[in-house]
Image (cartoon, helix red, strand yellow):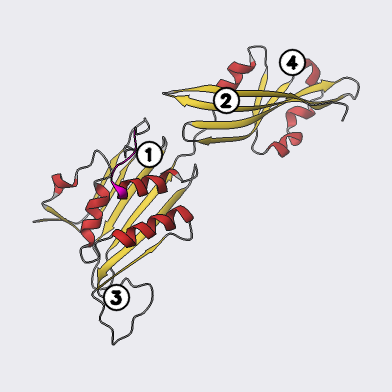
């Protein structure tokens, strides 16, 4: 058997994986990964070994412990669930088998093709795992351990922070719209410099639109659009309308799935 000290392998794809995994371990990993918020990364770490080196708590010296396992997720609920599954279904005496099982989920990686290697430290990342949301990738890392350190299997999920499809908003609002501005929280819109422009009425005759509270999760997106108009009677810029929208991604393109308009009474 050949020895491999370290390997890093990555598989990425621009498309969301289709279907759901049939293997229970793969399904648990996908559930954990798809719960990851955009722009964040989450990780669980599984420790398995002979003896009590991976026990959650010290064991009595009079008690013989053949093997032990523990898992940490930093208090992250989806990670705790994955940990619970891993501890209940792991091969404690043969940690490398757990690594191989996790690798089998990361299509198109096939652990059998590398069966003549004894892994010391390896890391694999893939976004092609069946059932993963678009923009989500899963990493599996294994360290065989030593006399000082127990073997560890790390499974992490990373979700890309993708931008909101403002171009779809502009197209839906129409060609006469001069300004579509983005802001984080809707409560922050009154502070926008554009709304304090002395020439607002002339520059933006059809008003200015502000996209706020925008969120993207997988192939779904939501946002609120506030329309601001110049109020002649009050000689100031006021919110005149609100649009609550939902978008769905089909293939490479975003489409508006819901567009609800509400007028705002300028008298209040």
Query: Which of the image's four quarters has the C terminus?
Result: top right
* Chain-order first, disc 4 or disc 1: 1
* Circles 1 and 2: CB atoms closer than 8 Å: no
**x and y, in percent, of residue 266 in the image:** 84, 26
* Chain-order first, disc 1 or disc 3: 3
Packing grade of label 4 (10 A; few <14, some 14-19, many >=20) is some
Query: Which of the image's four quarters has the N terminus?
Result: bottom left
Secondary structure at numbered mark 3: loop
Q: Residue at 34% across / 34% down in the picture?
A: 19
Label 2 to label 4, Cα distance in Å?
Answer: 18 Å
Left or right, 116 with respect to 22, comes to left
Label 4 to label 1, Cα distance in Å?
Answer: 42 Å
Label 1 to label 3, Cα distance in Å?
Answer: 35 Å
Q: Nearer the viewer, mark 1 or mark 2?
A: 1
Q: Which mark is residue 166?
A: 2
Secondary structure at numbered mark 2: helix
Q: Residue furthest right?
A: 233
Query: Dot 4 corresponds to which residue?
Result: 206
Q: Residue furthest top?
A: 175
Query: Dot 3 corresponds to which residue?
Result: 52
Query: Dot 1 corresponds to which residue?
Result: 132
* Chain-order first, disc 3 or disc 4: 3
Left or right, 75 with respect to 20, comes to right
* Chain-order first, disc 3 or disc 2: 3
Q: Which mark is residue 203?
A: none
């Amino acid at each position: 058997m050949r020895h491999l000290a370290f390997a890093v392998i990555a598989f990425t794809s621009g498309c969301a994986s289709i279907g759901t995994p049939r293997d229970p371990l793969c399904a648990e990993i996908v559930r954990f990964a798809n719960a990851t918020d955009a722009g964040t990364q989450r990780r669980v770490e599984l420790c398995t070994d002979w003896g009590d080196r991976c026990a959650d708590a010290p064991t009595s010296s009079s008690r013989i412990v053949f093997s032990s396992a523990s898992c940490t997720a930093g208090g992250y609920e989806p990670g705790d669930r994955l940990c619970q599954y891993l501890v209940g279904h792991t091969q404690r005496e043969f940690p490398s088998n757990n690594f191989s099982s996790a690798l089998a989920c990361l299509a198109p990686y096939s652990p059998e093709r590398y069966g003549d290697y004894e892994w010391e430290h390896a890391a694999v990342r893939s976004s092609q795992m069946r059932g993963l949301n678009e923009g989500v990738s899963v990493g599996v890392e294994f360290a065989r351990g030593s006399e000082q350190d127990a073997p560890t299997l790390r499974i992490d999920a990373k979700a890309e922070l993708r931008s909101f499809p403002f171009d779809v908003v502009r197209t839906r609002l129409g060609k006469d719209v001069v300004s579509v501005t983005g802001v984080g929280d809707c409560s922050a819109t009154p502070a926008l410099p554009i709304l304090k422009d002395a020439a607002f009425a002339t520059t933006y005759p059809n008003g200015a639109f502000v996209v706020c509270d925008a969120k993207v999760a997988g192939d779904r997106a939501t946002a609120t659009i506030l329309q601001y108009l110049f109020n002649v009677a009050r000689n100031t810029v006021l919110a005149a309308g609100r649009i609550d929208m939902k978008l769905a991604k089909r293939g490479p393109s975003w489409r508006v799935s819901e567009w609800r308009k509400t007028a705002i009474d300028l008298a209040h």
